[in-house]
Amino acid sequence: MNAAHPSLTGVPPETLNKIFKTLDYKEILRLRLVSRHLKNYVDTCRPDFHHKYIFVNVITNGYFVFFGNDVKELERKNHMKKVMSIAGDEDEWKVLETVLGHQKSPLEVLQISCEWEENEKTFVRVLEKIRNILASQNRTLQVKSLKIHVLNEDHLMRVLPSLDPASLKEIHLEDMLPLTLRREKKFIEIGRMKESVHWQKVNEFYAMNFLMNAPQFDDFDHFRTVRIGMDTLKMSDVVMLKEKLFVSPIHKFISINYRNLVEDVEIPEGHRPFPGADLYEYRIPNQDKHVRLDFMDGQVSIGIQETVHIGGEDIPVRAMDLDFDDEW
């Protein structure tokens, strides 16, 4: 084992578990002075167990793990990052086991990334390890937002059952490819995901960089925000989604990337604030709201926007959802 990595092999497992389960971070800091092994580990890994963000980034034969309560802090402080070799040494999983296994408060974001398809085998090992860590404690991890690189639905389903469905509100799927590179979009299935209890609890779903074959739009009725990609989109589906927003009990935004648009029906006449632009607005009866259809460059956005009254005119104000920044 690389001597630079902290080790807890000198601390009996039952003692270690009792410490991490019953003590808070300040108590652990005081206790670390009685054990060289514990001091080395705590000083290096800083196991707070009340993190808001845990980011796991898979690399060749290993992974980075970032954890903390502020994204900028994670990027700024070198001690928040560990490089682990998992070529065969089980002790190298200790950081991940400790950070995930003893997390005591709900996470804002769990991000599991792998930017290179060549690292898929290591990525699968990390997903299985996360699942086993939580299964060994007979619990699920409370996470608000899951962001994960995948090549297929199987990657997602290796970790999704390990998350608490009551806490999960967002699922973000991203292709295994660096942001600086582009390739033909892959098709992805979501059949197993739709059968999970998580699907019924989540209210935001993002899979813009994948293609779906004729998804059943009724499956997305309960979502607040949907961003997906399709090979072929029918105009009749766009009109149907517009009509759904007129009667939706929740504020919604839908964005669909498409390769082909089949104009099987005409777009209903609506207010066009910018002549020549493929932008249509429809007033919702008895409400200060509009439904907006916006077509541009292989993408259609369908959303609800508020209306304000200025100088006797109804002026649509673009809803916050239409400016959603889906950065990783």
Image (cartoon, helix red, strand yellow):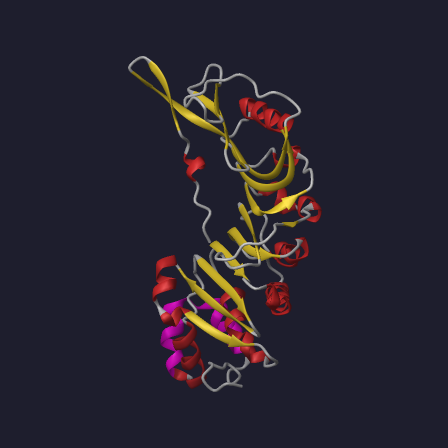
Q: Position of residue 273 (x, y in %)?
A: 41, 21
Q: Residue 13 sits in which quadrant?
A: bottom right
| Principal secondary structure, stretch drawn in magenta | helix
Q: Is residue 26 magenta?
A: yes
Q: Is residue 13 magenta?
A: no
- Judged left or right of residue 270, residue 130 is right
The answer to whether residue 75 shows anywhere in this view is yes
Task: Determine the residue located farthest toward the front in the rendered image.
Answer: 276
Q: Position of residue 256 (x, y in %)?
A: 56, 37
Viewer-proximal residue among 99 and 318: 318
Which residue is rendered at x = 57% and y = 75% of the image? 61
Q: Residue 159 sits in which quadrant?
A: bottom right
Image vertical order of residue 242 relative to residue 32, above or below? above
Q: Position of residue 133 (x, y in %)?
A: 60, 67
Viewer-proximal residue among 82 and 107: 82
Image vertical order of residue 181 relative to residue 296, above or below? below
Task: Determine the residue located farthest toward the top in the rendered image.
Answer: 312
Viewer-proximal residue among 191 and 179: 179
Task: Determine the residue located farthest toward the left in the rendered image.
Answer: 311
Which residue is rendered at x = 41% and y = 35% of the image? 320
The magenta segment? 14-33
The answer to whether residue 106 shows anywhere in this view is no
- Judged left or right of residue 307, residue 135 is right
Image vertical order of residue 246 relative to residue 164, above or below? above
Which residue is rendered at x = 63% and y = 55% of the image? 156
Number of callouts? 0
Which residue is rendered at x = 46% and y = 14% of the image? 286
Q: Position of residue 94 (x, y in %)?
A: 53, 75
Location of the N terminus (image quadrant): bottom right
